[in-house]
Image: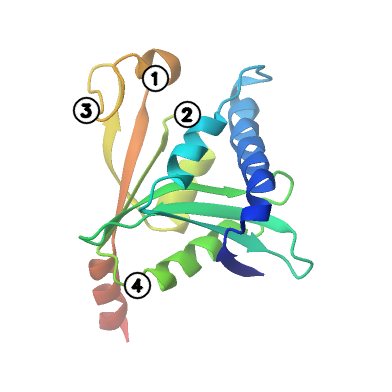
Amino acid sequence: MKLIRLKDENQREFKKYMQESFQYGYESIYGKDKSQILPESDIDKSLNNPKCHAYEMLDDDNEILGGVIVEINDDNINHLDFLFVRVGIQSKGIGQAIWKEIENIYSETKIWKTCTPYFDKRNIHFYVNKLKFKIVEYYNEKHPDPKMPEDKYAEDDGMFEFEKEMNKYKLQFWHKI
């Protein structure tokens, strides 16, 4: 496996696999849904942000296994916008491999931030137990995220915000040696 910058010619397939992955996560909890859980416009917003960088994880045959979009800021407090593994190949360490490479590429990051819907226990497990993020906020109807539209919570009932302090993590690692 190798993580490389997203190639323009793979962008359509990358977005398709990402949408399928998010759809699968939602439908595995709520059942079939005709609406698109992750609109292409949301992905395009990140892909078109000059601070964002997209990567694809490829196998030996150059097939997309998964991918990630991260926002890199001048203060090194960076944001994970999207991370996905293709439907049917989850739970094989691909997501962790993607994230490990991102941490290596952006080793100057002080804090990583991300969020996920409250209902997605699989994602919560992944971020907290596998990647060692901490839950720092629970946004919902009674405690809205100031960056989100007010009507957002009627749809999904809340989001968890996560952070991972990298300097703290690095210090803990070095103290164990």
Please state the horizontal and vertical placement of residue 99, each as a whole percent of the image. Answer: 48, 61
Label 3 or label 1, whichever comes before in sequence order: 3
Residue at mark 2: 119
Label 3 or label 4, whichever comes before in sequence order: 4
**How far separated are the C-alphas under marks 3 and 2?**
20 Å
Quick check: marks 1 and 4 in contact, CB under 8 Å? no
Q: Which mark is residue 104?
A: none
Residue at mark 1: 157
Task: Give the quadrant of the N terminus.
Answer: bottom right
Q: Which mark is residue 146?
A: 3
Instruction: Name the residue furthest right.
Output: 61
Look at discs 3 and 2 and give the one toward the viewer. Answer: 3
Look at discs 3 and 1 and give the one toward the viewer. Answer: 3
Q: Residues within 10 Å of mark 1 (few under 14, many from 20)?
A: some
Q: Is residue 15 above or below residue 70?
A: above
- Identify residue type, mark 3: Pro
**How far separated are the C-alphas under marks 3 and 4?**
29 Å
Q: Which mark is residue 107?
A: 4
Q: Is residue 70 above or below residue 157?
A: below
Q: Element under label 1?
A: loop
Residue 91 visible in the displayed image: no
